[in-house]
Image (spheres, rainbow, N blue to C red):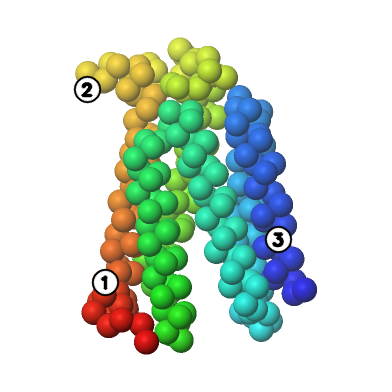
Amino acid sequence: MTTANKITLVRIAMIPFFVVFAILGGPVYDTVALVLFCVASVTDFLDGYIARKYNQVTDFGKFVDPLADKLLVTAALVIFVERGLFAAWMVFIILAREFIITSLRNVAAAKGQVMAAAWSGKVKTCVQIAGIILIFLYVIALRGTVGCPNYVPDGTTMVVVLGNIGGLSDEQMLMLVPAVVSWVVTLVTVYSGYDYLHRNWALVAEGATKPKM
């Protein structure tokens, strides 16, 4: 097994531990979860770099690497939904995009074609990872957030002190950063999905008009 594939498998093995600590919640557990997420995210870029630099690109890696990425990001987003930090409908849209593009890749592969990676897909991945890290940092810094019973909001924090600015309640102010981040992540993901569909619409159109022989 290549070094790149071993790194990918390590990333997958880290996901259950990340999930456990993120579910437990609390400043200490969240910090551990954040560290695990950051390390796993770094290995995402590392295994790709090694695979390309040392000619270790394999069919196994092409399958497992994107799977590991999606599992890691999905795990974080689902946990955020449970903790009231991310809207469920936004996560649905993000997952729908992944299913649609994966299906499109399968169609292309069945036709013997390779669907080229678009820059929007790379931006989407970076924005999702950065957004998840930012939300974790925000929650840890506040030592409390709405919707998570493991936390007790600290009334001395700057965010709470500024709660009345612009007519926002303390609860609304506490949720402002996660709300902004979730919107940015969702919109970038939607655009990425549109970009892929727009670039490869001929595959869909052909499949709708020509029956498979």
Q: Residue placed at 50% from the left, 22% from the top?
A: 148
Q: Is residue 199 visible?
A: no
Position above or below: 138 against 150: below
Left or right: where 21 falls relative to 154: right
Q: Is label 1 in a helix, a strand or a loop?
A: helix
Q: Are marks 3 and 2 in contact (CB under 8 Å)?
A: no
- Whichever of callouts 1 and 3 sits on the residue coming sooner in the sequence is 3
The numbered mark at residue 166 is 2
Distance, label 3 to label 2, CA atoms, is 48 Å
Three-letter residue code for mark 1: His
Q: Is label 2 in a helix, a strand or a loop?
A: helix
Q: Specify few, some or many for label 1: CA neighbours under 10 Å numbering under 14, 14-19, or 20 or more.
A: few
Distance, label 1 to label 3, CA atoms, is 33 Å
Residue 169 drawn at (x, y percent): 30, 16
| Quarter location, residue 59 | bottom right
Give the residue pinned by disc 1.
Answer: 198
Position above or below: 176 against 13: above
The numbered mark at residue 9 is 3
Q: Specify few, some or many for label 3: CA neighbours under 10 Å numbering under 14, 14-19, or 20 or more.
A: some
Three-letter residue code for mark 2: Gly
Distance, label 1 to label 2, CA atoms, is 40 Å
Residue 115 drawn at (x, y percent): 42, 78
Position above or below: 156 against 103: above
Between 125 and 93, which is closer to the camera in this rendering?
Answer: 93
